[in-house]
Every structure is written in C-alpha cells, then in structure tokens.
Amino acid sequence: MKAGLNIVKVGGSVVEDDSSLNSLLSAFCSIDGNKMLVTGGGRTATRIAAELGIESHMIDGRRITDEPMLKVVTMVYAGLVSKNIVAELQAKGINAIGLCGADLNIIRCVKRPAAKIDYGFVGDVKSVNTKELQVLIDAGAVPVLCPITHDGMGQLLNTNADTIASCLAASLASKYDVTLTYCFEKNGVLSDPDDDSSVIPEIRKEYYKELLEKEIVSGGMIPKLDNAFAAIDAGVNKVVITNAENLGTDSGTEII
C-alpha cells in the first residue's frame, strides 16, 4: 500500500495577504503525513514589475515572459515569495525546503516554441525528478516548489504554477497516493463569478466543455482546470479546487 502525499498549490491574492497566507499555512501544517507546497505569486510579480516600469501581458491566464519579466518572476517566485513561506513554515515547526525547478534538476522544461503567440521564456514540463523528491519527502522534509524551471542548458524558464502542481502530482502518483488541492481566494469553481456561494461541487469532462462554451469559466481558471484533468488522467487520486481557508475540509469543487 502506497503512502499518502498531499500536494497543495497556493496562489492568487492568498500569497499577498499576510492574514490569508498565515491561515493557509496553519491549515497546511495540520495536514497529517507527507506534504508538498507549490507556490504562485503572479499578482506580486505584476505589481513589482509595474514598480520597475515593466509592463505585464497575459493571454488566457498565462503570462508572456520576455527577458526583463523573467528577471522579475525569478526574483519574486524563487526569492521573495518562496523564502518568506519557507521561513513561516519553519516558524510553525515544519522542516520546509524552498526549491525551484533547477535545484536538484527537479523540473526540466523546454522553451515553448513561438507560434501564433510568442510566450517568451516560458517552459513546458519535460521531466520531473521523482527520485530526488522522494528522497526529500521520505526524509521528512517538506518541499516548497516555485514555478521557475530550467532547460538543462543554463536557461531559466517561467512555468505556470498550476502546471507545475499537476505535473508533480502526476509524476509522484506512481510512488504515493496523491491528493492535489488548488487553493485560491474563491470557494471553488463558481457557476456565477459574482456569487461566492455558487460553487459547482464536481466537474466532469463533458460538463467542463459546456462551461467553456458558455464562458462560465475563463482566464486563469482555464489552465487550472486543464491541469486538474491532466492530473486525474495520470492517476492522481483526487483533485480539489477550493478556498485557501477551507483547506483540509470537504468544501470546494472536486474534479472527476
């Protein structure tokens, strides 16, 4: 019987608000057994880029990453956000270790080819080093992964954090009984974006297609759901999208 592993991805405004982040991290610490945290921080990157006079461009929830923006997201994701979270977890008694994809060759990517849209220095996941991650997890460490990856030839790349979480969950599903939870500021996937109580309790693929056609889901929710279904297809036991405050409860949207 495989040991359990909870992978939690946190992003949105949660990582920007000290109170929300502290609440999320407290709930994360209370999860029994093996666990891993994947961090976003896109809004912080956008804010700091603006302060530096660098304009942000997004298409369907995905960031265009030119050379100046790559420097910003590397500083924010692998530095400011990651290390603050690791320090908070250490203060709560969790032996966390902050990593980017280049560390221990954890996540190797290929630069996305320029087609109709040139995303710049954006990476698509090629491989996940499950062996090194398993060594850390089995030793009692709690990895905190940020969405900065590499191509194996010295180039850092920006990779969607939801994709990172999905690929980690899929790769580790052969070793652990994996539950993947996407935490953000909403209570789940909403049928009415203006009504926080309109949570859709479960979504199957056919219903997802309907939601897309009716434009009920849009923006950053699209890659989140795409990655959720990819994880389920790869053997992940359970995927939930929920409010950070509800981590560890049965609230939210379960992907079937």
Image: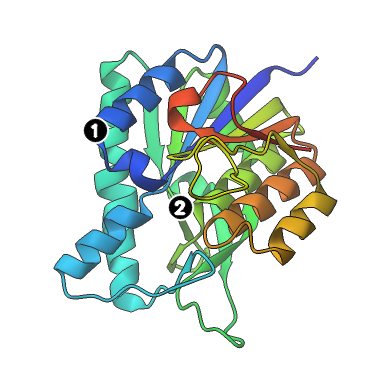
Q: Secondary structure at mark 1?
A: helix
Can you say whether 32 is above or below 243 in the image? above
Binning the other alpha carbons within 10 Å of mark 2 as few (below 14), some (14 to 19) or many (20 upward) gives: many
Q: Left or right: 210 with respect to 67? A: right
Residue 95 in view of the camera: no
Image coords of residue 173 (percent x, y): 73, 34
Give the quadrant of the C terminus.
Answer: top right
- Closest to the camera, between mark 1 and mark 2, is 1
Image coords of residue 34 (percent x, y): 56, 19
- Say which residue label 1 marks: 18
Task: Give, as a three-letter code, the residue at label 2.
Answer: Pro
Image coords of residue 140 (percent x, y): 49, 17
- The residue furthest right is 206
Can you say whether 53 is above or below 221 in the image? below
Binning the other alpha carbons within 10 Å of mark 1 as few (below 14), some (14 to 19) or many (20 upward) gives: few
Q: Nearer the viewer, residue 248 or 165?
A: 248
Give the quadrant of the N terminus.
Answer: top right
Residue 233 in view of the camera: yes
Identify the residue shown where x is 63% and y is 47%: 191
Q: Which mark is residue 147?
A: 2
Task: Give, as a three-letter code, the residue at label 1.
Answer: Asp
Which numbered disc, 1 or 2, marks the residue that appears first in the sequence? 1
Identify the residue shown where x is 36% and y is 39%: 14
The reply to whether the C-beta atoms of the residues labelled 1 and 2 are less than 8 Å apart is no
The image quarter containing residue 11 is top left
